[in-house]
Amino acid sequence: MPLQNRVTPLGDLVADPARGLVYGNRGCLHDDAGRIRRRYATRRWIACRLAFRGWRRTKLLQPGRFTELFFLDEATAFAAGHRPCALCRREDYVRFGELWRGLHPGDSGADAVDGRLHAERVDPGRKGRRLHAAHLDELPDGSFVLEEGEAHLVLGESLLCWTPAGYRERRARHGGPATLITPPSLVEVLRQGWSGAVPLLHPSARAARA
């Protein structure tokens, strides 16, 4: 049976056999039986390589260990509110930090980045997901918006419906107001032409767009 450790663009955890192209964590979210009990355990939400230095994973969701999470691609990880890991993606982390300081000159270090991202992704009142108002025609490729209750990837003149296994159901991108899922600061990182060591887009994005 699939584990509940696949992350949607809205940051929810679902059980699905697909594993995606990006790995990450946000602390220990499960109990000793492997059941998800909380949405997050830390403000440090990271996105990692699937493989690093030959490290091998043992059984997932072990008691007291961080919850291993999987994302379709980095656009999904960004939408959920995760940023590059400083260990397995050091070059990406350094470049991300340079871009971030250009956007937020007063932020210095991982704690400042994670604190700002946490405020952009979590509703302070309900502790659920925070969404943002935006204009669809102003968003860069790789952003996610909520359309008719479903997460859609912005790519060129298209909106692509997200699923755990890939993108589907292309629709034309309109120019009106939109409900933005991706935290605004990460939208600005995407606007700078972000590309890292893990795939920004799953191959199905290009196929669905064609």
Image (cartoon, helix red, strand yellow):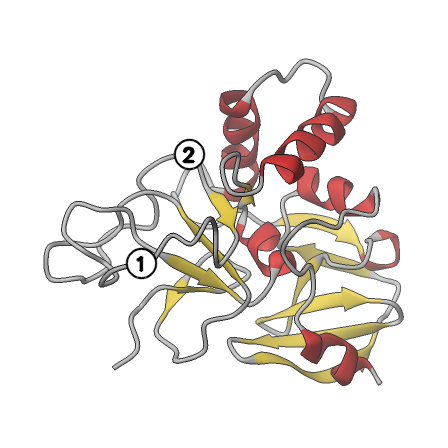
Compared with residue 82, is residue 58 higher up or lower down, i.e. above or below?
Answer: below
Tell me if mark 1 has few (under 14), some (14-19) or many (20+) residues whose alpha carbon lies within 10 angstroms of its own.
few
Disc 1 marks which amino acid? Arg
Contact, mark 1 vs mark 2 (Cβ under 8 Å): no
Classify residue 156 as left or right of residue 10: right
The percent position of residue 24, horizontal first and vertical second, equals 44, 51
Comparing 10 with 23, the one in front is 23
Please report whichever mark, 1 or 2, sits nearer to the chain's N-terminal start.
2
Q: Which mark is residue 43?
A: 2
Classify residue 200 as left or right of residue 61: right
Compared with residue 81, is residue 43 higher up or lower down, i.e. above or below?
Answer: above
The percent position of residue 89, horizontal first and vertical second, equals 57, 42
Compared with residue 105, is residue 19 higher up or lower down, i.e. above or below?
Answer: below
Residue, x 55% and y 68% (percent of image)?
72
Q: Which residue is mark 1?
A: 57
Q: Residue furthest left?
A: 32
Q: How many marks?
A: 2
Q: Considering the numbered disc 1 on the image, is that residue within a helix, a strand or a loop?
A: loop
Residue, x 73% and y 16% (percent of image)?
105
The percent position of residue 156, horizontal first and vertical second, equals 87, 67
Compared with residue 15, is residue 75 higher up or lower down, i.e. above or below?
Answer: above
Q: Considering the numbered disc 2 on the image, is that residue within a helix, a strand or a loop?
A: loop
Disc 2 marks which amino acid? Arg
The percent position of residue 173, horizontal first and vertical second, equals 84, 71
Classify residue 106 as left or right of residue 31: right
